[in-house]
Amino acid sequence: MRQRLAVGNWKMHGSLPENRTLLEALAAAAGPDRVICAVCVPFPYLAQAQAALGGSRVAWGAQNVSQHPKGAFTGEVSAAMLREFGCRYVLVGHSERRQLFGEDDATVVAKAKAALAAGLTPIFCVGETLAEREAGVTQQVVGRQVSAAAEGLGNEGLGAVVLAYEPVWAIGTGKTATPAQAQEVHAFVRGLLKARSASLAASVPVLYGGSVKAANAAELFAMADVDGGLVGGASLVAEEFVAICRAAGGQE
């Protein structure tokens, strides 16, 4: 059975006082047993997340990682450093990293490899831009990105990641793929996994990311191939994120 997840991506938001209130509320909330709830926070707040969430049912992680294990890479953060702060997850290939910072498929795969080598679970993001969707090349784009992961990581590595489909046109725009649109791409991704291995298709979670809110989460997560969500702005509001975690577990 595939794991269900709801993962919050704080992006470049937060402050020590604001975080304290949010993290304490998340740690105190009892989420569904069958769902892993996690937050990916900015690097400076990893120690705070570790202190606040340690011993709770909420996991934590980072939003980026270097592909290099150590060395003269000023400003970079290695996977081993993230492990020291108790991280379980790390985002790789988020559309903002691809679009704004020029990360290509090879770089994203290298980061996923570094994360796996350190015992972290990469949340490997894929998705198309609005122009690509309107051009009718969604499957070509997403297929290329998933294939890069498969070829670079191999079946064993791919089996240890979480995939996240995030249509770039629905991130931070208020637009959301309809449940049917999300399911169509998720089913396509599941088919790519199945072409490599039936066990991969049965075990690798595929999350949906793109303006997920408490109001639309249950409908999105009810789709057969949607295993939870990668949540942006709504993860900064405790009540919203807790509701999304419950929706991922089939609870209203």
Image (cartoon, rainbow, N blue to C red):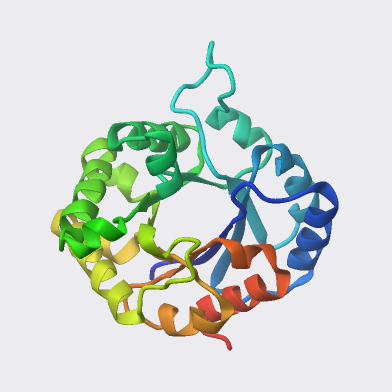
Counting from the top left corner in percent of width and height, residue 168 is at 37, 57
Q: Is residue 99 positioned above or below 75 on the image?
A: below
Q: Which residue lies furthest to the bottom in this view?
A: 252
> Is residue 200 something that shows in the picture?
no
Position in image of residue 13 (x %, y %)? 67, 50
Q: Residue at x 57, y 86 (%)?
A: 251
Q: In which quarter of the image is residue 36?
A: bottom right
Number of numbered discs overlaid on the protein picture? 0
Residue ranking furthest to the right: 17
Q: Which residue is drawn at the image coordinates 50% and 38% (left, top)?
A: 119
Determine the residue located farthest toward the top in the rendered image. Answer: 72
Q: Which image quarter is the C terminus in?
A: bottom right
Could you say where residue 225 lies in the image, as x and y percent from the top left?
32, 73
Could you say which is closer to the camera, residue 167 or residue 159?
Answer: 167
Q: Identify the residue at horizontal 60%, vertical 63% (top origin).
A: 233
Q: In this view, does 140 lie to the left or right of 15?
A: left
Would residue 141 be seen by someone viewing this image from the given angle? yes
Is residue 177 toward the left or the right of residue 62 in the image?
Answer: left
Residue 239 drawn at (x, y percent)? 71, 75
Question: Is 181 rendered above or below residue 109?
Answer: below
Which quadrant holds the N terminus? bottom left
